[in-house]
Amino acid sequence: MDSFLPFTLSSDQYRILLTAIVFVASAFLFLVPKLSKSKRLNLPPGPPGWPVVGNLFQVAGSGKPFFQYVRELIPVYGPILTLKMGTRTMVIISSPELAHEALIQKGQVFANRPRENPTRKVFSVNKFTVNSAVYGPVWRSLRRNMVQNMLSNSRLKEFREVRVSAVDLMIDRMKSEAEANQDVVSVLKHARFAVFCILVSMCFGVEMDGDEIERIDQMMKTVLIILDPRIDDYLPILAPFFSKQRKQAMQVREEQIKTLLPYIDARRSALKNHLGSDKMAVSFSYLDTLYDLKIEGRQSTPTNDELVTLCSEFLNGGTDTTATALEWAIARLIEKPEIQSRIYEEIKSTVGDRKVDEKDVESMVYLSAVTKELLRKHPPTYFSLTHAVTEPATLGGYDVPTDANVEIFLSGIAEDDRVWSDPKEFNPDRFLSGKEDADITGVKGVKMIPFGAGRRICPGLSMASLHIDLMLARMVQEFQWKALPSQKMSDFSEKLEFTVVMDPALQAVITARK
């Protein structure tokens, strides 16, 4: 994820924040005369804030998750609002019309990314990734390479056997856990492992054992944790108080490079020497497209540090989003057994007794409707990756300055009762009636955009959809899913980790199909 979203403050962090007010009060008083002379922006409405820190205290001190805080502001201030978070200005959009205006109608202007904090810059190698790059030649080069040479439909088909192997392994691991745990399995854990297996093979062109995969996976989790927002992201003057955290971040970055670089070097050597050992069982990989990649505006090819960053982006970008979707999917099938039965009946009528294949899921209309409803009700994150404007712009009649973080509140859009009937209800049939549908790319109109929309739409949309469809179909074909008696399925509590996960994590009782 790339959004700068707030956090809950501890008592120690409150003291630091109070210290910040004292530190910067004199600077604020010095700047007031200059600010009063500058052009006053017509920003969207929002709650009044304090000098220097803006709304940071209200948000962090509310005791509520940020998404819930925003939900409660929308009825008060409308579908576009402003939060002042220290030195950062957040413009939050929650209506389909405004999202379409920003991402489609004014897509080129809203295609930038905001400035990064110093820690994040270390890991992105100064914004050298598809998701974080400034809108321009570097972004065009990186995105074009990823989409054309790795995520096109023709290229994805080359990794069919990789997916078959990973999904088979997932099923076997679920069976093993069920046998050892009175038929109870942890859904997210197994889904995440399977997706990560696929992406590791696609990225590095190698087949690894479970211990290797889990070691790399743990490293990727550590990277995501170290990138969580801190107070000094919003108040850079507090940076001296976070020297320990910066040192920890540098150590994590060193460990990340140490973990991934051997695989990068091994693949480079294998390609150079035309080797085809058992460890290099995949004939093509994402890395193959990167070694000699030409970047517009620069003569050099990516450095080793940049290769580590691009590989990490590929692994992190598609793992938690897909795994989280599968956890929510199984929860919904347990909540509504009739939906689970209809998927199973569609599988049986399509493939009979043989194992369902990814070609089969392309013709499963009801499965597709379930997946689409899943992504509407449970987008992987509350907000799309943060946008910024390339030049001063207007949106909904309000000013959007170039230093603003433009946040798209996905849940607000997907639950808008002006475009959806009974939006709180999980109902796949809405996509079968012909009365309700949605182009998830947003091109034909924004109603749900779980992958974002416009020029910065997630390049892995097709891959994620394929993985969700295939893995969900196999999970339903192999097992009947029921609720763990001790876990209530009525409220679907959620929390933000790297993505929006169930709270607590879903455990389910499985019974093998006969």
Image (tube, helix red, strand yellow):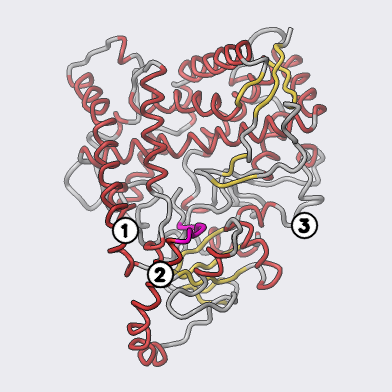
- The answer to whether residue 85 is above or below residue 130 is below
Q: Position of residue 48 (x, y in %)?
A: 57, 79
Instruction: Quadrant for residue 404, please give it.
Output: bottom left
Residue nearer the viewer, 125 or 248: 248
| First to last magenta residue range | 4-11
Q: How far is disc 2 from disc 1 in space, using C-alphas? A: 24 Å
58 in magenta: no
Q: Which mark is residue 403?
A: 2
Q: Nearer the viewer, mark 1 or mark 3?
A: 1
Query: Residue, x 67% and y 33% (percent of image)?
Result: 329
Instruction: Quadrant for residue 408, please give it.
Output: bottom right
Q: Residues within 10 Å of mark 2 (few under 14, many from 20)?
A: some
Q: How far is disc 2 from disc 3 in space, using C-alphas? A: 32 Å
Q: Residues within 10 Å of mark 1 (few under 14, many from 20)?
A: few
Three-letter amino acid code at disc 2? Answer: Asp
Name the residue tied to disc 3.
417
Q: Earlier in the sequence, mark 2 or mark 3?
A: 2
SS at mark 3 in the image? loop
Q: Nearer the viewer, mark 2 or mark 1?
A: 1
SS at mark 1 in the image? helix
Marks 1 & 3, CB-CB < 8 Å contact: no
Magenta portion: prevailing SS class: loop
Query: Residue, x 34% and y 14% (percent of image)?
Result: 281
